[in-house]
Image (tube, grey):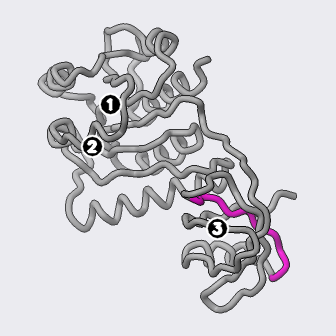
Amino acid sequence: MDAPRIHHPQPLQAGQTVVLPPAASRHVQVLRLQPGDALTLFGDPLHGGQWRATITAIGRRDVTVQVQAHEAVQREPARAVHLAVGMPANERMDWLVEKATELGVASVQPLLTQRSVLRLSGERADKKIAHWQAVAVAACEQCGGNRVPLVQPVRALADWLADPVRTGLGRGLWLSLQPDVPTLARWAAMYPGPCHVVLGPEGGLAPDEEATLAHAGLQPVSLGARVLRTETAALAALTVLTLAP
């Protein structure tokens, strides 16, 4: 049986004894693990991959482990895909983040658009981002991914497009999902590098928002003739882009 996977986003080294972060300690306790049980730690920003470890002590709040050997295991897609998505309402954003993480998304940018049903700002937005980041961590623990995608702070679409820091995501193909335009599969086959995909919420993007994306240099692409929900479209796009040869 594989050792439980625990997220530990700090550099590690063989032979080191560390106290797990609070969330990771709670996870170990919920699993009812005991001293001597094996763990797999992932999230090391310096070495990548994952580490074998053994639980040495379990207290009321803290769990201590001894780090053993590093394993250079990577399960990320060859192409980095960044999603910028008009947030769907209710629990659909949770589901989108979870499944996008399983498919290997590199980052998720929640967007506030003209037709957004979910309106977030201030402390409520901060709490949602922390929640979605935790959803991404749990999805990586389950699916075997060793790099947790970053869930960015909520931004208005216009502000995000106007922010020069946006280009810090790196060069690549910038795409906007829209109806009645060439299909995404065609572009995926033509361009093997990193991609940035923007899509709207329930009801799609407003015409002036689509025009703004085009003016910003984003290529409009479609997923075919059917009308897909936001969360379905996001995952369909990820599947095309991450599984394309």
The span from disc 1 to disc 2 (Cα, nearest Å) is 9 Å
Residue 2 is left or right of residue 220, and the answer is: right
Name the N-terminal-most of marks 3 and 1: 3
- x and y, in percent, of residue 93 in the image: 41, 47
Three-letter residue code for mark 2? Leu
Tell me the CA gap for discs 2 and 3: 35 Å
Q: Quadrant of the C terminus?
A: top right
Q: Which residue is drawn at 49% across and 32% down?
A: 235
Of mark 1 and mark 2, the one earlier in the sequence is: 2
Q: Which of marks 3 and 1 is in front?
A: 3
Mark 1, residue position: 198
Q: Residues within 10 Å of mark 1 (few under 14, many from 20)?
A: many
**Which amino acid, mark 3?**
Leu
Q: Name the residue under label 2.
A: 111
What's the magenta region? 35-44
145 lies left or right of 134: right
Q: Which residue, given by chain and number where applicable, does mark 3 sit on?
A: 12
Three-letter code, disc 1: Val
- Can residue 114 be seen here? The reply is no
Query: Can residue 39 be found in the magenta stretch?
Result: yes
Q: Which residue is drawn at 34% across and 43% down?
A: 88
List the single residue furthest toward the left: 208
Of callouts 2 and 3, the N-terminal one: 3
Placement of the N terminus among the 4 image quadrants: bottom right
Does residue 215 appear to the left or right of 229 in the view shown? Answer: left
Mark 3 crowdedness (10 Å alpha carbons): few <14, some 14-19, many ≥20: many
Q: Check if mark 1's residue and mark 2's residue have beta carbons within 8 Å.
A: yes
Query: Where in the figure is residue 141, as x and y percent of width and height?
Result: 64, 56
